[in-house]
Image (tube, rainbow, N blue to C red):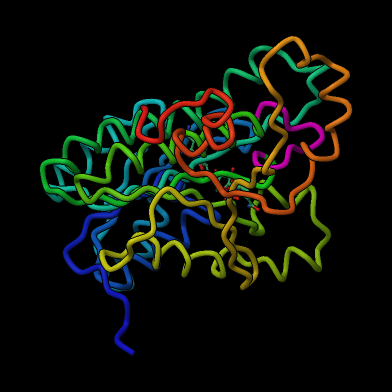
Amino acid sequence: MAELRFDNQVVVITGAGAGLGREYARLFASRGAKVVVNDLGGSFRGEGSSSKTADAVVKEIKDAGGIAVANYDSVEYGEKIIDTAIKNFGRVDVLINNAGILRDITVKNMKDADWDLIMTVHLTGAYKTTRAAWPHFRRQRYGRVINTSSSSGLFGNFGQGNYAAAKLALIGLTETLAKEGAKYNIHANALAPGAASRLTETVWPPDMMKLMTPTWVVPLVAVLVHSSNKETGSIFEAAAGHFSKIRWERSKGLLLRPDDSLNPDAVLKGWNTIIDFKDAEHPNRVADSMGLLRKALQLPKNAP
Ligand code: NAD
């Protein structure tokens, strides 16, 4: 089988100075891409900055014979990161929104600053880079976006209300980008990774850290952003060599007549039907969410 290549493509990776981002940068550069290595170089809580983090990865890539350029802006100034790609390489083909920090604390003890900074880095950052790349994607009728979500976003996690909210918001953004980009061959997918990094070293035991090399996440992302891939608007998990897809599931549900008999007692009576996932559906558009509701409202099938 031929090697999956990215020759002459420009790949922008945010937070590429360490962890997963560094591994993406090295892989894409080794397979022919010109890489923008963005990293603010601050602490895992989002304090401070340093150009050394991105520079070190650019040097690694160049020493190995690859092409890369550094960018040190925070993702909240996404347009500057995309500018670096355009000024140095004249285009952008792939955007991997990966930069991330943590401010773990229960909602009870959370300060607004903990909430705001997490939203800014994870959610606003991905929005800013994507919005800046979008006109280029549209003009060239080609673009690939990966937004980095998390199992904390999908399922919630104790002490991560801010992070979980931002990470689930990225799913909504991704699903919308997939719809807005479809006509222009712009694909967007979300990833919930698992990898040993400074974000997980305080949580996972040393044995697990050894197994969860960030390298094992990278191949899935490479496949997703390759020009041959048709997947868009999807959520994937990748960790330690395990790869899977996640989707919404909706119970067939309970349909009650919308009249005076529709009261809390009727809902309670039908409770087991509401939560029964036998004959479940897997909606992926707002129109799909009508389902039985359409029947309840007696709308014709082709109504908006
Ligand atoms: P990491 O700390 O090793 O790497 C993140 C990088 O992002 C750092 O180099 C950091 O300097 C950079 N960064 C932080 N804020 C930035 C900003 N404002 N602008 C530009 N760069 C910034 O962490 P990682 O584990 O490789 O995480 C990568 C992504 O994966 C993050 O979005 C994280 O939330 C997500 N994630 C990781 C795991 C995991 O198991 N490691 C699980 C779920 C989600």
Left or right of 240 on screen, residue 36: left
Q: Position of residue 137 (x, y in %)?
A: 19, 44
For the N terminus, the quadrant is bottom left
**Residue sitting at x 62%, y 38%:** 44
Query: Which residues make up the magenta segment?
Result: 153-162
Q: Position of residue 247 (x, y in %)?
A: 58, 51
Q: Position of residue 177 (x, y in %)?
A: 35, 38
In this view, 278 is above or below 243: above
Left or right of 249 on screen, residue 227: left
**Residue sitting at x 59%, y 35%:** 292
Give the quadrant of residue 7: bottom left
Residue in the foreground of this view, choosing between 143 and 181: 181
Left or right of 236 on screen, residue 183: left
Residue 81 part of the magenta-drawn span: no
Give the quadrant of residue 27: bottom left
For the C terminus, the quadrant is top left
Give the quadrant of residue 71: top left
Q: Position of residue 241 (x, y in %)?
A: 61, 73
In this view, 32 is above or below 10: below
**Residue sitting at x 52%, y 51%:** 235
Q: Quadrant of ligand 1?
A: top right
Residue in the foreground of this view, choosing between 228 and 129: 228
In this view, 146 is above or below 77: below
